[in-house]
Amino acid sequence: MPFPILETKRLKLIELTHQHANAVYEILSLDVVTQFYGTSPFTLPAEANRLIDIYYKNYLDKRGIRWGIKLKENQRIIGTVGLNVLHLKNKRAEIGYELHPSCWRKGFAVEAVSEVLKFSFKKLELNRIGAVVYPENNASLSLLEKLGFSNEGLLRGYILQDGVFHDTFMLSLLKQEWEKSQEE
């Protein structure tokens, strides 16, 4: 199956390749981006290439799909969005995303995540999209709640980052809830 390219009014969601490694490195080397990401900031550009390879392998193995978020106006990669822990048999996945801080609070994340939800529920016919979010990540919690996600509760000591265990919230959106929101 060819990699699905998605488009919104301002964005094009594309397959990431090694030619995008510098942009991915630039974003994921920032403390402010990775503080709620579950990993340490990148310190070497080669880490971005390895991550892109992981995204590609996960796509081939049907275990995930990750898009680069490209601004149509200038073709700049401003982040990534996609499905992790994709389980087609059980029709579920978890969504993840990050943006360069210069693109925060401009509606790009809502635009990109909304398009991935549409693809997930319509094309992949998933029933559930989950999201694992640090309780301190108010921006992400607000975004997901705006898109109709429900907070299912606290997962204690769920993520180990930089030698410290962190609690996370588990949020989810079911297909029937998403469909209802599309009618309104």
Image (cartoon, rainbow, N blue to C red):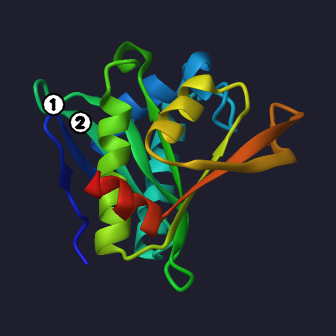
* Image-based side of 111 in relation to 51, left or right: left
Residue in the picture at 44% in, 16% down? 101
Would you place residue 94 above or below residue 162 in this image?
Answer: below
Residue 75 is tagged as 1
Would you place residue 74 above or below residue 18 in this image?
Answer: above
Residue 60 is tagged as none
Residue occupying the far left of the picture: 73
Q: Earlier in the sequence, mark 1 or mark 2?
A: 2
Residue in the picture at 62% in, 18% down? 31
User: Foreground residue, 9 or 62?
Assistant: 9
Q: Secondary structure at mark 2?
A: strand
Which image quadrant for residue 166?
top right
Marks 1 and 2 close (CB-CB < 8 Å): yes
Q: Amino acid at mark 1?
A: Gln
Cα separation, mark 1 vs mark 2, equals: 6 Å
Residue occupying the far front of the picture: 184
* Image-based side of 79 in relation to 95, left or right: left
Residue 92 percent location from the top left of the image: 54, 71
Residue occupying the far top of the picture: 102
Which image quadrant for residue 163?
top right
Is residue 16 something that shows in the picture? no
User: Foreground residue, 68 or 128?
Assistant: 128
Is residue 9 something that shows in the picture? yes
Residue 110 percent location from the top left of the image: 36, 36
Q: Sort mark 2 into few (<14), some (14-19) or many (20+) by Cα contacts within 10 Å.
A: many
Residue 70 is tagged as 2
Residue in the picture at 54% in, 49% down? 149
User: Foreground residue, 21 or 161?
Assistant: 161
Q: Secondary structure at mark 1?
A: loop
